Image (cartoon, coloured by chain):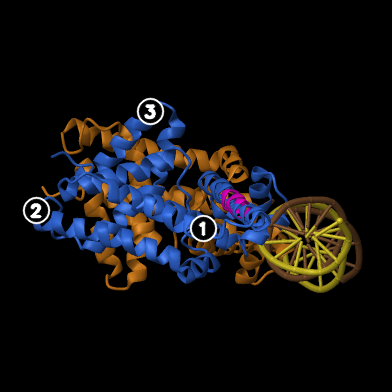
Chain colours: A orange, B blue, C yellow, D brown
DNA sequence: GTCTATAATCAGATAGAC
DNA sequence: GTCTATCTGATTATAGAC
């Protein structure tokens, strides 16, 4: 997967290497392009962190620019709007999710699902999971219009949806629950305020919090 | 309870009824006071509805004023800030919660807890549950400084906390879970995005959604 | 592409007449 | 207390020099 992406990226490099001046120019362009990509990644990472910390509404573009160390106008050369910036942050985390899902060792579907939820909650607790308000309509429109976002979301949903159905077929997940409700419930763990409240209390480690919420999610509050 | 509050309010009425002019003036004051209270309640209700619909950050004071049909400056005569307005909305719902808890018929603690969660989710789905972002620091400060809010929250938490401990002692709720984690998990159902997602899907009734989320909350996703 | 400087807008809060 | 009109500050977004 990731080697695929690298080979695709390197195939964009110019193939003419014979004439020095041209080579220099080409190298310069490639270098610039790489620098550009690095900077864009820095912007997205800063945005991602601030989105996790303060949420979309309270995050300002000024902050993001200041965090990266560039002027706000420069940021707007890379991303046409605050919404697009947030969308890029979501695409990035969906990319990470795709890698994570692809690299998961084979296991029972239920264990796969638990591993994904554990991973999402860890990202949340370490401030790497951007949390977007589902109510903001302009943001929603931008996300829906982003092919990269929709594709990433669909791919993740397909993978997890298949696991859910398998787990239900095996009787590991309650077959009476609609699969879509199960999927939403798992997704919701990524932005569960219980994680923040327990962290604020300060009496549990991140690992304990993750296992606690994971347990209540799959096993429920009632005794078994 | 409510009869108590009414008698207290009526005890504020002037006791001098002999001299007509005075009586007229007094009656006018009382009427004005009642009108004031009614207007404040209308403001809080509008705020509550908009908080549920759009959240704190996206709700504007202009909207609230327009919804009530008064000028924004008039609203600020009643509430010193947007945060205070949100706090009043929370106090109101906590008051409703107190009434609901007091009127609950005696039952097993687990059933009491389920009834409360069911009630909170119904309020959410009917747009009567204001949802405040836990990240906004100025809002948090206002809430923490509000005695009415803190008292209401403490009282509800005490009541529910006692039920949780009883249910754990009886082995109905998993005794290995910290009671505070259980309480947070129940509170979180009041602003669960899963409710909104399922409602948006349009294939479930509000009652079905409530029972679905209630089931996953207490019984978990895994089969029993 | 990056910067400084600035536009344009919006929202929370207030002044002052009635 | 209520209104109209305004202030103030913050924020998204852009113009234009380099």
Q: Is residue B7 magenta?
A: no
- Do labels 2 and 3 touch, CB within 8 Å? no
**Whole-number angstrom distance, CA of label 1 to CA of label 3:** 31 Å
Give the quadrant of residue B30.
bottom right
Q: Farthest residue in the left direction?
A: B170
Residue A220 place in picture, x, y as percent: 21, 48
> How packed is label 2: few (under 14 Cα within 10 Å), some, or many (20 or more)?
some
Residue A179 place in picture, x, y as percent: 30, 33
Give the quadrant of residue A181.
top left
Tag of residue A2: none
Residue A208 place in picture, x, y as percent: 24, 65
Q: Which residues are magenta?
A: B31-39
| Image height of A166 relative to B104, above or below | above
- Do labels 1 and 3 touch, CB within 8 Å? no
Instruction: Give the chain letter at badge 1.
Output: B
> How packed is label 3: few (under 14 Cα within 10 Å), some, or many (20 or more)?
few
- Give a yes or no on whether discs 2 and 3 share a subunit: yes
**Whole-number angstrom distance, CA of label 2 to CA of label 3:** 32 Å
- Give a yes or no on whether discs 1 and 2 share a subunit: yes
Question: What residue is shown with label 3?
Answer: B205
Left or right of B195? Residue A20 is: right
Of residues B129 and A113, the one nearer the viewer is B129
Q: Is residue B35 magenta?
A: yes
**Whole-number angstrom distance, CA of label 1 to CA of label 2:** 38 Å
Of residues B172 and B116, the one nearer the viewer is B116
> How packed is label 1: few (under 14 Cα within 10 Å), some, or many (20 or more)?
many
Question: What residue is shown with label 2?
Answer: B171
Instruction: Give the chain letter at badge 3.
Output: B
First in residue order: circle 2 vs circle 3: 2
């Amino acid at each position: 997967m990731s080697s695929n992406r690298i080979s695709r990226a390197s195939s964009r490099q110019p193939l003419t290497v014979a004439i020095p001046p041209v080579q220099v120019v080409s190298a310069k362009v490639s270098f610039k392009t790489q620098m550009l990509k690095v900077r864009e990644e820095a912007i997205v990472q800063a945005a991602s962190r601030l989105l996790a910390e303060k949420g979309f509404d309270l995050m300002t573009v000024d902050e993001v620019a200041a965090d990266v160390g560039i002027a706000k106008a420069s940021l707007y050369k890379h991303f046409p709007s605050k919404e697009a910036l947030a969308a890029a942050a979501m695409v990035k985390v969906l990319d990470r999710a795709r890698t994570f899902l692809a690299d998961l060792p084979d296991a029972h579907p239920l264990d796969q699902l638990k591993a994904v939820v554990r991973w999402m909650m860890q990202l949340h607790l370490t401030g790497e999971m951007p949390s977007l308000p589902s109510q903001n309509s302009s943001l929603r429109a931008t996300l829906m219009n982003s092919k990269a976002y929709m594709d990433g979301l669909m791919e993740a949903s397909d993978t997890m949806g298949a696991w859910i159905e398998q787990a239900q077929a095996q009787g590991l997940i309650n077959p009476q629950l609609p699969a879509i409700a199960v999927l939403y419930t798992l997704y919701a763990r990524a932005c569960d305020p219980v994680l923040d409240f327990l962290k604020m209390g300060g009496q549990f480690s991140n690992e304990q919090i993750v296992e606690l919420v994971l347990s209540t999610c799959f096993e429920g509050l009632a005794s078994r």
